[in-house]
Image (cartoon, rainbow, N blue to C red):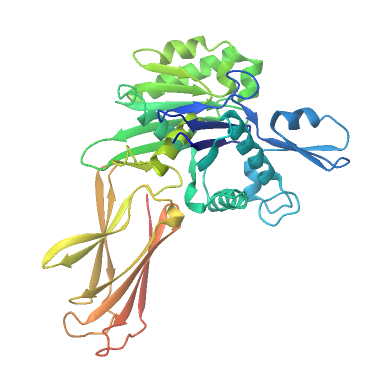
Amino acid sequence: MAKEIILGIDFSRDYSQLSYLDDTGKPKSVSIGTENNYLIPTAVCFNSELKEWSAGDEAINKSHSENSRLIKELPLLFNEDTEENVGKRAVPVIPDFFAYLLKLAVNQCNGRLIKNILVTVEEVNQNVLKGIKEVLTDLGYQKDDIRVISHSESFVYYTLNQNKDIWINKVLFLELNEYEFACRRLEVVRGREPHVADVKVEDLSNLFDLEMAKKDIHSCDRILADYMDELLKKHVVSGIYLSGAGFYLDGWQKTLQTICRNRRVFKGNNLIVKGAAYGAKECFLPPTLDKYLISCKGRTRVKITMAVEYKGKDSNITLSNIGDYWYDATSKMECIMEKPTKAVFEIQDLINHSNDTFKIDLRDFPEREPNTTRIEVDFRYVEENKFEITIKDLGFGDFFESSGMTVTREVTLQ
């Protein structure tokens, strides 16, 4: 680890940040220009006269010149069909910005090469996942050396690497910046392994936003203090993190008086990027948190199993586990049925401690001798909270041809 860098990147709409694992395996944030200045504007600027690109603070400074165009909120470009998008687009906005970030990291680490990269974004979807991997592979990195996770997952990795007294109960992460005001709530459900680290996100923009806080901090302080007072009556919370430009404004006295009673409270802007570095450590080095499954938006929140008989004993085969990205949560299996009358499945909700069973009727399949019907079970999520199971009759070798019959069942999770 002394020769190569394991790098974490927070690629957010307002600012990006960098963090790498030092020689002791701890995250170290990269300062830009001055000490403790970790924020890199997520922006690029193009000067049409000079045909010149710039990024970060330099982009902001040069945007005031003639013939210059400033492009911000770069993560949103992955979801837009514009010429500024990635891939074979005319304007290489995001690739240039990532090249700039990687150059900063290498320079700050005395020229050490970057081996592995984990990028954390506000929310992972297929466009973002594919786009970031395309950008980094085009810059020369191998797909196996790249990971993309959400801010909620970074929050989990950061928190679970802190002293256990912080997350012995629920932990809150409040973010107030130019683009969002949200509260992430982490609960670590411990019991039989694996444990589950579950994150729920609540949008608080209905309370106020950053501009309102700048104009009338005292009113916003009262609103937030009242909200937190009610929230803390419902949940036992042992740690609270405050992040974003909004919490660096003066005037949160009532809120701090409310949240600091008998719990640990921290303020800082580099929690997410350090969580990215901790996440990279889990992905690219021997894991230390492999007893935990992460459940959050974008990931599956339940375990789906199919009842089978194996070597004369009742058993279950897992079709999908907690913590998979829903669009990657697919499986396919074949089995031989004693009687093709029904297939039994179970939905296990480890967070809410509930199990639900459902059956798929197969009585329309051809009648055959016992143990002479082979079926294929195809499982996939069609949406984040909806999955589909298709069962196909495969026949039985040379004895019985496949009838071609299929049965499909769609299940919506509550």
* Rendered location of residue 19, percent (x, y): 52, 31
Question: In this rendering, does residue 121 appear at all?
Answer: no
* Rendered location of residue 191, percent (x, y): 22, 38
Splitting the image into 4 quarters, where does residue 110 fall?
Answer: top right
Question: In this rendering, does residue 397 appear at all?
Answer: yes
Left or right of 134? Residue 264 is left
Q: Residue at 38% across / 42% down in the picture?
A: 295
Single out the residue that lies furthest toward the left. 312
Q: Is residue 316 above or below residue 213?
A: below
Camera-nearest residue between 323 and 158: 158
Splitting the image into 4 quarters, where does residue 213 fall?
Answer: top right
* Rendered location of residue 109, percent (x, y): 56, 30
Left or right of 141? Residue 89 is right
Q: Residue at 20% across / 65% down in the picture?
A: 308
Total number of numbered discs in the rendering? 0
Q: Quadrant of the N terminus?
A: top left
Camera-nearest residue between 174 and 283: 283
Camera-nearest residue between 93 and 373: 93
